[in-house]
Amino acid sequence: MAKFRIWGNRPLQGEITVGGSKNAALPILAATLLTESPSTIHNVPDLLDVRTMIMVLESLGARVETVDRGSYTIYPQQLKPLEPPYELIRKMRASFLVTGPLLARFGKAQVPLPGGCAIGSRPIDLHLKGFAHLGVEVSMRSGYIEGWAEKVHSGEVYLDFPSVGATENVMMLAATIEGETVIANAAREPEVVDLAHFLSLMGAEISGVGSDTVVVRGRKHLEGCSYTIMNDRIEAGTFCVAAAITKGEVIVRGVEYALLRSVLTKLEEVGVQVEKIDEYDVLVAMKERPHATNIKTMPYPGFPTDMQAQFMALLCLADGVSVITETVFESRFAHVGELERMGAKVQVEGRSAVVMGVERLTGAMVTATDLRAGAALVLAGLAAEGMTEVNGVGHIDRGYERLEEKLASLGASIERVSDE
Ligand code: UD1
């Protein structure tokens, strides 16, 4: 696997426009299977996870044609009720999102249990409970989920936790069921809203998206359409922290200010200058050492778990002690041990990490164990004195498109070194 070599301690300067959202692209690509007619999706980021999802669609018989950079037409007419290969599903948990569309198209689905980032046990019980409320009979056999949906009906689904994936899977199946399905305690994430917009264009009627109660009035036959994916708020947040941790000044363009509110508020709290230029552009500048603060990850609109690791990198350099509490995932502190190799002082106690700020980090050899942990190590490397080598860049490529090129365009000294 390739690695990044970073020479740190240089302020980032300039402007950067973020790309399409990974977490919106994955469910929307899966949703193109809900109909027989083709859809064209624009602003799809070029990421490993997206390539995996495209391979999943192809493994099921869909034809995927590249129209242009970031634009794909999906022809799902020849879709077959096949099992997606274990190798693909294991690689990426989001590939389980084809289950809803398979149930909708064929009344049955057989899908291997998913894998995904190494960030704690990530069950799919809420997806299955949701399907069951819509009349799907679900059973589990030798590592597979089997669903039979011969008598699907609209219904009321209550999610014990506002799971993003479960909301999306249930919403997709419900979009093809006539009658009114209510999803209570639904996820409110902007990417769920983006999927709902796509499903509405396909012909479903969906209200309440962005709130905790989503009402879907489905239609048996949906139509393919053309859709442009929203931009990636986590990529945007990562660049905002990159500007702050390097004591730089960067304009981050392309993501609605409101979607970054929790992250920007925390940045302001630690002393970062945040200026809203307009609805989609924000300036982030930092001159001093950050103050300490406390963070608790929560479902949207709370502080995103997908920004926790990057923010920890920043707080490692804060003046004082910060407490970061992870409430969304069971274990998402794999970056701690690696940050410690760079001189950070962090103590993990259950779901909380106590971060005792140090004055400087020093470059070291570190390893990314998951996507956001990898991003955190890159940020730490940008601020550290000396050279940092981040191994396991494949994890970073799952969710950041050409991260090193984008950071280099802001003046970072970073290169990709392939491991022969
Ligand atoms: C999505 C995002 C991921 C983000 C996460 C939380 C995509 C492709 N990925 O993942 O980047 O970190 O939301 O914002 O959009 N859970 C259950 N049972 C279930 C489903 C989930 O217990 O059936 C638990 C999980 O173990 C986890 C929590 O709920 O602790 C949140 O998971 P969920 O919101 O489903 O995340 P994903 O959709 O997998």
Image (cartoon, helix red, strand yellow):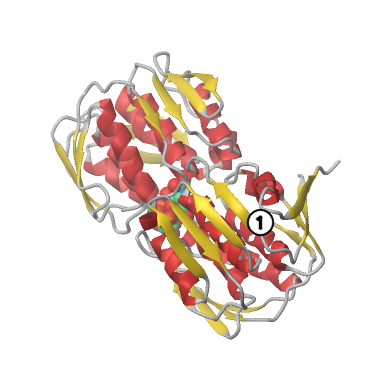
Viewer-closest of 303 and 18: 18
Q: Which quadrant holds residue 394?
A: top right
Q: Which residue is under mark 1?
A: 369
The kind of residue on which mark 1 rests is Thr
Side of 254 where 132 appears, left or right? left
Q: Quadrant of residue 148?
A: top left
Furthest residue in direction top, as rendered: 78
The residue under the point 50% across, 41% down is 143
Q: Residue furthest front?
A: 277
In screen coordinates, is 403 left or right of 268?
Answer: right
Residue 147, by quadrant, is: top left
Residue 286: image location, x then y, percent? 58, 70
Residue 141 visible in image: no
Residue name at image x 56 percent, y 39 percent: 49
Quick one: quadrant of the N terminus?
top right
- Residue 342, given in percent of the width and then of the height, sits at 75, 71
From the top left corner, tell me how far across and down residue 27 is, in percent. 41, 38
One can see residue 262 in this view: yes
Q: Residue sitting at 57 percent across and 48 percent down?
A: 16
Asked whether 105 or 312 is in front, the reply is 312
**Which percent across, then down, holds residue 104?**
30, 28
Is residue 353 shown above or below 89?
below
SS of the residue at dot 1? loop
Q: Nearer the viewer, residue 2 or 133?
A: 2
